[in-house]
Image: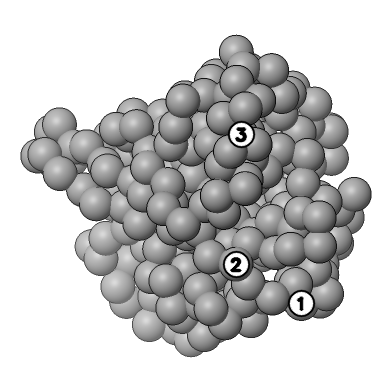
Amino acid sequence: MDPYTPPALARSTLLALWLALGPRDAASLTRAARLVQDDDEPHEVSGLDPEHERAARDADGPPGGVGLLLAAWGGADAVVALLPEAGRAAAVPAAVSHAAVDAGECVLVERRGRAFAAVPEVRRFGSDLEPGHLVRWDVVEVEPWQNRVLGSVGTVEDAERELRAALVTATEALDALDVASWREDAADAIARLRAPVDLGSTVPSALDARRARVLSQAVRLRTIVELASRDDGGAVNLWQSDQRGAALHAVGDASRRALEAATLHLR
């Protein structure tokens, strides 16, 4: 069985963090673009407002792709990354709701009285052993979104409290499922979950301690949910319980909201 790899932060999550907190000089913008892209091919951008694109290029930012978004929107009045799912997309502007749910993510920005959404379209290529990804960010002007997002996502303080309760639920679910006894790679993965997830190499150094804790905890919870539901095996009978399924579902929702709250920055 292939070793288990915990999920990384979504592209939109990283982009939102760097938009809110990243430095604006050309070298740092180039580094931030590389971190958002990770192992992807260079990202493309479609639909960026011509005025914003000209301003980004005039600022001597990265030559294109996601670097244009970082240069054009850095220092925006408001930014957030959302991770919508079917039936859980109330905070997403209607103009991009379908695309954002399909992608499972989007970035929202408000700048100088105008609001925009960027949704990544990801195309996979290559083999299972050597996968690759082509990413295009589709930018759309949308209605102002701050009030809707605040009502749906809440504050980072709220998220931290919810995560503490969700971690207890998730740990109890793993114990009940006894995942380690029927997954060869699960024991090591579960052991790794007991330590904080180190995100320091990918997030801005200006990220405050509370947001860093929330991001780390949320990634741990998403990993637990993924680990507990990755395959059927011995978990099938235990998973038939509606109570057990609801518990893990609630944990997944808490981690998703926390990741969103940690990226919400209002100036």
Q: Residue at x 60, y 67 (%)?
A: 141
Determine whether the residue tagged by mark 3 lies in a helix, strand or loop: helix
Determine whether the residue tagged by mark 2 lies in a helix, strand or loop: strand
**Crowd class of label 2 (few under 14; some 14 to 19; many from 20; radius 10 Å):** some
Q: CA distance from mark 3 to mark 1?
A: 29 Å
Foreground mark, 1 or 2, reads 2
Determine whether the residue tagged by mark 1 lies in a helix, strand or loop: helix
x, y percent for residue 198: 61, 27
Question: Foreground: 18 or 59?
Answer: 59
| Residue 160 in sight here | no
Foreground mark, 3 or 1, reads 3
User: In this image, 37 relative to 72: left or right?
Assistant: left
Question: Foreground: 79 or 130?
Answer: 79
Q: Amino acid at mark 1?
A: Arg
Q: Residue at x 49, y 44 (%)?
A: 11
Q: Could you say which disc has been placed on residue 181 in the image?
A: none
Q: Residue at x 27, y 43 (%)?
A: 134
The residue under label 2 is: 141
The answer to the question of whether label 2 and label 3 lie on touching residues, with beta carbons closer than 8 A, is no
x, y percent for residue 51: 62, 48
Q: Amino acid at mark 2?
A: Glu
Q: CA distance from mark 1 to mark 2?
A: 16 Å
The residue under label 1 is: 148
Upstream in sequence: badge 2 or badge 3: 3
x, y percent for residue 31: 55, 19
The residue under label 3 is: 56
Q: Amino acid at mark 3?
A: Ala
